[in-house]
Amino acid sequence: MTDQATKHAKLTIEGVSDPIELPIYSGSVGPDVIDVGKLTSQGYFTYDPGFVSTASCDSEITYIDGDNGVLLHRGYPIEQLAEKSDYLELCYLLLNGELPNSEESAEFVDTIKHHTMVNEQLRSFFKGFSPNAHPMAILCGVVGALSAFYHDSTDIDNAEHRKITAHRLIAKMPTLAAMSYKHAQGQPFIYPRNDLGYAENFLHMMFATPCEDYQVSPTIAKAMDRIFLLHADHEQNASTSTVRLAGSTGANPFASIAAGIAALWGPSHGGANEAVLNMLDEIGSVDNIPEYIKKAKDKNDPFRIMGFGHRVYKNYDPRAKVMQQTCHEVLEELGVEDNPVLAMARELERIALEDEYFVEKRLYPNVDFYSGIILKAIGIPVEMFTVIFATGRTPGWIAHWNEMISGPYKIGRPRQLYKGYTTRDYPN
């Protein structure tokens, strides 16, 4: 956002003689914004449920143009990053603002690899969770607990501390995610291996056991890397805004990220790909799809097709285009074309891309639709889907938290339109 207002808006209020002049600022791209901060001193503030028309910050990290299906990370289109880059390079880009050269890339990858282990005492935390605890409940707890182990990097005013914390969180999230899965399976934890790539290491920790190694398919590892990459950041969504809001209090980064994980757990946010699989379970078989398509088109029927359309993207989700290709690569690699759940998903995909109702309303398959299918095909249980989302989103959360902490910022304090009782006396 430019430091100087490019123009001004005038707000005329009935019964007030003089209009209120509000500055308008322009970003490097996207719509202009009206600064309403002056309204408070005039006795007013704005009403914007869900903050759908409110910019709470300025940022240089990610830009979304939902109408045209554009997603840029530091200016780079997501399609180009998915094709030419990988997850750890995108992590570096989000954190540092520029792509790394070969030397910087090698150093960053080496740093992440050597931070993947967690303090051995943290393993005992898992004993306190029920074996049937949801992995997101576990992840939220253990990430918050990291602040009890890494006191040497919680000074938020120290740039080096922030850098170390960023590296630790990106490195340890796959380890904690896999541990959450192993706990639910009643299996021993598998230590990370520094000779494996990021996504490959995660899959190994998920599926290997002490009595049998797990050979990771390059196709599957590439697909998991893309899932992480495509979920790395998505501008000021609910969980990222939660991280910023928690961080604005001065909370340590581990607590702030744990708050983001809690927000992501909601079915309207990170649980969307889990909802896709639950929907497919409800449909039951390909033969039942016409009936459920009819229900989806009925405004009076509560049933909705999950994984189609997006709150932000009014056009095709650019991440879905990449994930669609990856999805078909994985299904071909695994030879699971006859799986009934995946057969339903592919039939729904075909209908959504051809049916006039879906095309007219732009209800295209989104990234959650395809990622859910991929994870199901790989053998990852539904309850782990949001954990994997959280693992991928970690660098975005950290980048936004660090961007805020690095400059002047205010503690978040939304206002409200009060509709309760006015002053009343306590009864005698």
Image (spheres, rainbow, N blue to C red):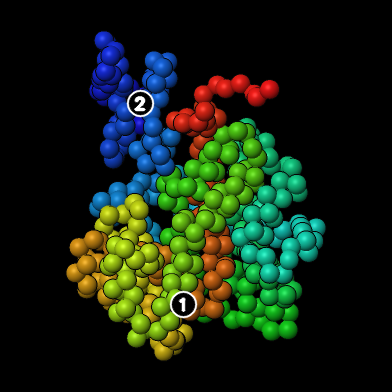
For the image shown, how many numbered marks are present on the structure?
A: 2
| Nearer to the camera, 42 or 201 | 42
Q: Residue furthest front?
A: 428
Viewed as shown, does residue 298 lie left or right of 112?
left
Give the x, y percent position of residue 177.
Answer: 62, 63
Amino acid at circle 2: Asp
Q: Residue at x 28, y 40 (%)?
A: 30
**From where the camera sits, is residue 349 visible?**
no
Q: Earlier in the sequence, mark 2 or mark 1?
A: 2
In percent of width and height, residue 365 lies at: 33, 67
Q: Which mark is residue 193?
A: none
Q: Which mark is residue 35?
A: 2
Disc 1 element: helix
- The amino acid beneath tag 1 is Asp
Residue at 25%, 53% (x, y): give it.
Answer: 68
How dense is the environment of label 2, judged by Cα within 10 Å: few (below 14), some, or many (20 and up)?
A: some
Query: Element type at marker 2?
Result: loop
Q: Residue furthest top?
A: 17
From what the image shows, is residue 271 above or below residue 216? Answer: above
Residue visible at 63% across and 77% down in the picture:
207
Give the residue at mark 1. Answer: 281
Q: Position of residue 283 (x, y in %)?
A: 41, 78
Residue 382 position (above or below residue 246): below
Quadrant of the rendering where the C terminus is positioned: top right
